[in-house]
Amino acid sequence: MVAPANMAQALAAVETGLARIAAGDSALKAFLTVDAAGARQAAGQLGDRPLAPLQLAGTLCAIKDLSDTAGLRTSYGSALFADHVPEHDDLIVARLRRAGALILGKTMTPEFGFGAICRNFLGGPTANPWDMALTSGGSSGGSAAAVASGMIELGHGTDFGGSVRTPASFCGIASLRPTPGILPNPKRALGYDMLATTGFLARDVDMLSRALLACAGPDARDPLSRTFQPAPRGQSGMALRIAATDDFGVAPVASDVRGRLAEAVAGLPASLGEVRLDHPDCADAFAIFNVLRPALIHREFGELEQRFGKRLSETVRWWIRRGEGITAQSYLQAEAARTALTRRFISFFDRFDVLIAPAASVMPWPNTIPDVTEIDGRQLSTIADYLAITFIVSLAGCPVVTLPTPLHQHRLPFGVQLIGPPGSDLALLAIAARFEAEADFRYVAPPHALFHIFAGEDIST
């Protein structure tokens, strides 16, 4: 979309988005709260601002309902906070507004972001615009469905174990999980822990790049906030050193996902470079994740479970129970192992520019099934096992761009993770832009897209 040059165009863009939400969201259930008045007010104010320095001027945006929005209900996907209205924006929300983004509302998430489908006690489940019976993925599936269907141009998300990457793959769009610290979080209680991070979802790499540049930058209140590595890689014409893996040697992955990855890799043009099958040693990734994540969840939400019990979702309670009894020694051993894993990834990228892996271990499943308990008939040990293909990368602290691969004759989209070394976000986005342009790893409108519904300028272009 061309940035609006004046208030009238900004207002027309907002009306476009609101019309599409009104027409399609009763079925998709991508939004938990729509803020028509706030979006119109922001558009009116945009008309009085100099547009040149605003990377996201007039961009239609929505915020995952885990992040605070001043004056706009933020429930964290929980009925316990159904009437909670924050006084202040989270930092990234404030930076999005400062860059000219027009926020249309809050998107669906499972309670506190823990769940395989986008459903909570307040609404959902969010449908997949490719097949309304299927899930959009957890836990940023509301933002993913809103972007894929054309309601918004930029979706805000969060990612701990794969929560922007899996929905992006399921809905056929692009996503970015940046290096932790690039998008600071000064409200994080454990300032020196960085497994989760804010991310973005969009229909192309350019929008992801604009969002990152608009919102990145250190904040002194976040001790792990950081800046980009300046040196770009992957410029047009340079052969890339590409590695690919379908499972990191340990992740359970469905056979159809392995087949789609093999097809996507085989179809890469020679201009991008030669592909080698390789990956870092990830043998202890399960042991690390199964200590760190439940310990962190138990610390943050254990008191809520004691107070409210079954008023919390079963998935939240399951994660809290998993964290009971984890000792300090076990936690520190897991952190030491995570450090070693990260260093193995960093050494791996001495030999490769980018690592390709599936963005989800399974294809989208029906929204009537709350959890992934088996893959290809093989029972999983926990409901978190299917996340291994993404949580391994979270443990290593690497930036990831997710792109949809060419559909060919397939019925559903399939996305890949393009993974780079920590701090290489700008270089990775440049590489992703090449995959988008040279390999046709790009967005295709799904059957339930809403681009035909518009008021004023059609934002589909």
Image (cartoon, rainbow, N blue to C red):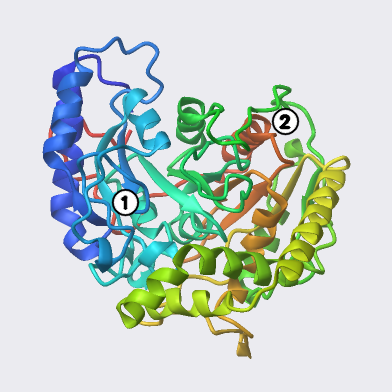
What amino acid does circle 2 point to? Gly
Mark earlier in primary sequence (1, 2): 1
- Classify residue 249 by image quadrant: bottom right
Q: Residue 91 or 440: which is nearer the viewer?
A: 91
Q: Quadrant of residue 353?
A: top right
Q: Tell me, for residue 234, which label it has, or none.
A: 2
Q: Is mark 1 on a helix, strand or loop?
A: helix
Q: Pointer 1 and pointer 2: residues touching (CB < 8 Å)? A: no
- What amino acid is at disc 1? Ala
Identify whether 138 is placed above or below 158: below
Q: Is residue 306 visible?
A: yes
Tell me the quadrant of the picture where the C terminus can be found.
top left
Foreground residue, 268 or 57? 57
- The label shown at residue 86 is none
Report x, y in % for residue 340: 84, 55
Task: Residue 229: give x, y in percent of width and height.
Answer: 70, 27
Image side of residue 33 versus residue 111, left or right: left
Q: Residue at x 25, y 40 (%)?
A: 87
User: Which corner quadrant of the image does residue 100 belong to?
Assistant: top left
Vertical relation: 429 (above or below) 137: above
In the displayed structure, does residue 67 sit left or right of residue 331?
left
Q: Separation of disc 1 and disc 2 at Cα?
A: 31 Å
Number of residues whose C-alpha sits closer than 10 Å to that of mark 2, classed few (under 14), some (14–19) or many (20 or more): many
Q: Residue at x 71, y 25 (%)?
A: 232
Quarter in which the N terminus is drawn: top left
Q: Can residue 361 be seen in this view?
A: no
Report the disc number at residue 146.
1
The kind of secondary structure element at disc 2 is loop
Provide residue 94's location: percent of width, then percent of height: 35, 31
Mark whose residue sits in front, 1 or 2 = 1
Q: Position of residue 16 (x, y in %)?
A: 17, 38
